[in-house]
Amino acid sequence: MKIYRFVPATDGYRFVESNRNARWWPTGMNLGRGTGHFSEHPSGKGPSLYEGNRYETDDKRWPELELNPSDFPPFALNVPLLSQKAYEHLHKLEGLETMIDVWVDDEKHCAISPPVLHKTVNFPKSQYLQESEGLWLYLVKRVFNEETINKHIFWTKELMPFSDVYLSEEFVRKAREAHLKGLEFLELVWDSGKPCLPRYTPSAYNPNQMTSRCALESELVISRCDCIGVVSREYGPILEKAFSEGLIAGKDELPTLEW
């Protein structure tokens, strides 16, 4: 069994913009407990910024960049978006039963709400970033309990409401056979009973100047921190250290795998 961590490619692709100070995930998607403090609008008043599940990409603001559309538009690491082409090739796989229609630059896409699987990760044997009280912030080396995995795409309960998304070998195979764009930099995190630690080029973490990949990775951690009450003065140094040690990718690249 091979398991991949979902990481949409960002370099050269249109990036779906969202304001993480409000509820940015699509209406109809239930991420579970811990998200009640996210209001519809950053000010706490007013309608949703994404009424009708409509989003825009940065291509609208910067057409001179000549960015390409992706079959998995970069949006969030915990919420995969699929183009209509991707939907046609993948929708029959187990785990893709719950999809929500969204519009990106007025083109119809699907947001996947993966099933939440229990006890898929053996945390005592895994390696992760944690805050001072021992709460998990980011898994860097995952030991999976294979017998609990019966879907081709899934969230893991222990990291909800902002779990990484994991893909099966069959999901990845079908996507590649269909020549779908946007999965060029997936992380292989488990292979034939063995966990692997992806290593990247060390980089600097600067909240005021981030690549698209860095933004996706850091926003996943920050969203978790918001839910458990970890403040920026604590998670900031944790992120800085992780990026500087190459535990988190600062840009699109294939990792070196440590077994």
Image (cartoon, helix red, strand yellow):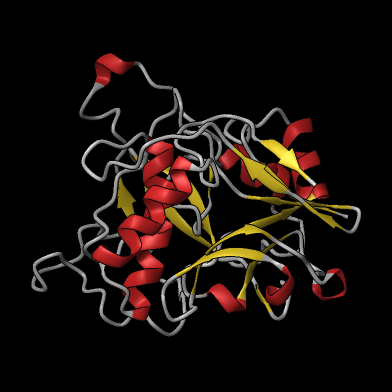
If the image is split into quadrants, where does the N terminus sit? bottom right
Direction from residue 242 to residue 219 in the image, left or right: left
Q: Is residue 13 visible?
A: yes
The answer to whether 56 is drawn above or below residue 97 in the figure is above
Position of residue 44 measured from the top left corner of the image (x, y, whole percent):
11, 73
Q: Is residue 25 visible?
A: no
Direction from residue 208 to residue 29 in the image, left or right: right
The answer to whether 50 is drawn above or below residue 15 in the figure is below
Direction from residue 107 to residue 40 in the image, left or right: left
The residue drawn where x is 36% and y is 65% is: 223
Position of residue 246 measured from the top left corner of the image (x, y, whole percent):
53, 40
Residue 19 location, quadrant: bottom left
The residue drawn where x is 69% and y is 49% is: 197
Which residue is more in the foreground, 148 or 179?
148
Position of residue 130 measured from the top left corner of the image (x, y, whole percent):
49, 69
Which residue is more in the foreground, 64 or 144?
144
The answer to whether 200 is drawn above or below residue 26 in the figure is above
Which residue is more in the foreground, 163 or 250?
250
Residue 231 location, quadrant: bottom left
Position of residue 233 measured from the top left corner of the image (x, y, whole percent):
24, 64
The residue drawn where x is 67% and y is 61% is: 96
Which residue is more in the foreground, 246 or 176?
246
Direction from residue 93 to residue 123 in the image, left or right: left
